[in-house]
Image (cartoon, rainbow, N blue to C red):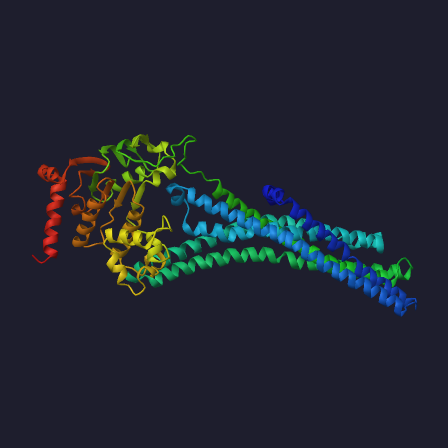
Amino acid sequence: MSIFRKLGWFFKQEKKSYIVGVTFLILVAVVQLVPPKVIGIIIDEIAEDNIHLNIIVFWVIILLVAAVAVYVFRYIWRTNIWGSAARLEKDLRRQLFDHFTKMDHVFYQKYRTGDLMAHATNDLNAIQNVAGAGILTFADSFITGSMTIVAMMLFVDWRLTLIALIPLPLLALTSRVLGSRLHDAFRESQEAFSTINDKTQESITGMKVIKTFGQEQEDLADFSLKIDNAISKNRRVNFLDALFDPFITLIIGVSYVITIILGGKFIMEDTITIGQLVSFISYIGMLVWPMFAIGRLFNVLERGNASYDRVSGLLGEKTHIVEKKDAVKTTAKGAINLDVASFTYPDDDHPTLEQIKFTIQKGDTLGIVGKTGAGKTTILKLLMREYDDYEGKIIFGEHDVKNYSLNALLHAIGYVPQDHFLFSMTIRDNIRFANPAYTQEEVETAASLAVINEDIKGLPEGYDTLVGERGVSLSGGQKQRISIARALAVDPELLILDDALSAVDAKTEEAILHNLREYRKNKTTIISAHRLSSVMHAKQIIVLDEGRIIERGTHSELLALNGWYRRMWDKQQLEAKIEGGE
């Protein structure tokens, strides 16, 4: 029953709907007591040879009125209780999705995509069932059951009622024992479902890699193992769930036997009439569903409780990126001064960055180069406040980036990540993702700067081409250039290209860089790259190695140092000549 307490905030919010719903549930229970009583009266009239057409018509009318009343009352409680349950699911979905949009990288490193999907689907459905089916079964199992028992005592015989109900306490004991085990079993079942979700999402996304390495059978075998585990967990849930119904049937059967034996004895002693016994047996029949409802109630409540705990755990996670109450709301602009003495990723033992210091004047371009894992992307993440736990300061314009609101900071930045992501929509909508109101002219201007406009127009559907999930229908270079166009469309104060030209050829790269130099003369640009030709025109270039700056200067100055930059430049130039057939 603790789940009702946990959802107390919602029941208070929907108090009116639930009061109306439960009231009409009670009215249904009251009206349903009428037919068995009427049947008993008619049977007694027949037994006493006292039946007449007028009497039959009268009681038939009573039964019809009761049937219509039950229909109307059921409609009212259903619209109120099921409608409220649907609103609970809607509220939780909104809360959960809103929470996802606010969480940082630490959160998404902790939870797998499959887990989050399971929380947003199965768990929310289980919680909704508590607010809908849970309330219904609670009312049926306790309210309807109690009223039926009272009617049995008042309309028939209290002694027969008490004796017939002797087996029922066993039901409460069984429900308590099985309910606790069902809670644990269902939690394990949901976790197994999360694992399947995650495996499915990962396999579909990485299908090209799986096929390339010929791992289809191995991946299928791994998926089958996870399916078998989930089936095993679900079998335990179903086994525990299945124990309720047979036990309830046994209890009701024992009650029927007791009723027939003692009822027959009471009739022979003229304590009750035949009609009263028939009514009593009908009332026991009416107790069947409430008894089953007790089993279902514990099932629904335990499932909902386990799911609510999982969802609450997610909603209880706190982002490490917190806006100040007096955060600067003005969009960031101006020079960038970064001075980071040390930064270490969560759960890492060694600093990723140490003694990183540079200044970028407004309108300048900074190039960041270095071998894989040197810390290039980490610097960009700190600029965009993906992590705040570092020693030092990052000043953007007149304020520390931590003093800006996230909107004021991020709206000033256009970012093209290494793993360029396109949404399952048209090319046009991907480019104008930040502002769907952009005109076709503005979209094509951004595409032209990214040297993708002609490629798009050459497609059968042009800008109306659906890119498929994650841009699956496009080449790597096309996806990369559309990502660049999307960033340029917002005309950001700071443009960040994180190895965003790796999938284009040298000629296209030079064309894009030329467009950026002409189009963004008064805007700041940061280019992180492995290919040195991407940064050779930058006003300043820094070379990273193991999280430290080992070289700094312009392209010509770095060549003159004869260090890492010069060695890498000569190597890449030689590779270019070999590829060009020179």
| The quadrant where residue 281 appears | bottom right
Asked if residue 284 lies left or right of residue 377, the reply is: right
Indicate the position of residue 121 as horizontal and vertical percent values. Answer: 49, 53
Of residue 203 and residue 412, the one placed in the foreground of this image is 412
Asked if residue 85 lies left or right of residue 381, the reply is: right
| The quadrant where residue 527 appears | top left
Q: How many marks?
A: 0
Q: Is residue 215 visible?
A: yes
Residue at image position (41%, 49%) is 112
Residue lying farthest to the left in this orientation: 582
Asked if residue 381 lies left or right of residue 369, the reply is: right
Q: Quadrant of the N terminus?
A: top right
Of residue 242 and residue 37, the one placed in the foreground of this image is 37
Q: Is residue 422 visible?
A: no
Indicate the position of residue 455 as horizontal and vertical percent values. Answer: 25, 60
Asked if residue 389 lies left or right of residue 184, the reply is: left
Indicate the position of residue 39 as horizontal and vertical percent values. Answer: 82, 63
Indicate the position of residue 452 as horizontal and vertical percent values. Answer: 25, 56
Q: Quadrant of the C terminus?
A: bottom left
Q: Give above or below for 204 relative to 52.
A: above
Residue at image position (35%, 40%) is 410
